[in-house]
Image (spheres, helix red, strand yellow):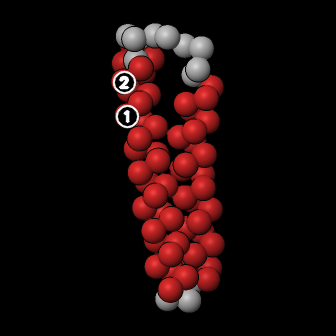
Amino acid sequence: MKVIKHKLFHMFIRWGLAGHGVLHLTETAMNIYEKAWYSAGISAFAGFLMIAGATIDMTHHGGDDESG
């Protein structure tokens, strides 16, 4: 599938993962405010995974210059 290797598709996925991660970090802040410690921990972990996934995808495709 050619679309999966397309640079714009990867950029869309990175931005989606990063945005989802930011939502989780916002949720973490709300959970801390509500003193929901377990939920805060789970949300922080999920946010970290989303943002890490976005940055790892960006760095491991550094040498690829496929535009589709």
Q: Is residue 65 above or below residue 19?
A: above
Q: Is residue 19 above or below residue 46?
A: above
Query: Which residue has dot 2 on it?
Result: 8
Determine which quarter of the picture holds residue 45. bottom right
Q: How many marks?
A: 2
Q: Amino acid at mark 2?
A: Leu
Determine which quarter of the picture holds residue 42. bottom right
Check disc 2 and report its element: helix, strand or loop: helix
Badges 1 and 2: C-beta atoms under 8 Å apart? yes
Check disc 1 and report its element: helix, strand or loop: helix
Which residue is at 46% across, 37% downward?
14
Which residue is at 60% across, 46% downward?
52
| Image location (x, y in percent) of residue 64 | 55, 13
Q: Residue furthest bottom?
A: 35
Q: Is residue 43 left or right of residue 3?
A: right
Find residue 12 and name its label. Answer: 1
Q: Amino acid at mark 1?
A: Phe
| Image location (x, y in percent) of residue 68 | 38, 10
Q: Is residue 28 left or right of residue 9?
A: right
Which residue is at 43% across, 53% downward?
20
Q: Is residue 2 above or below residue 31?
A: above
Determine which quarter of the picture holds residue 43. bottom right
Which one is nearer the viewer's eye here, 2 or 45? 45
| Image location (x, y in percent) of residue 18 | 47, 47
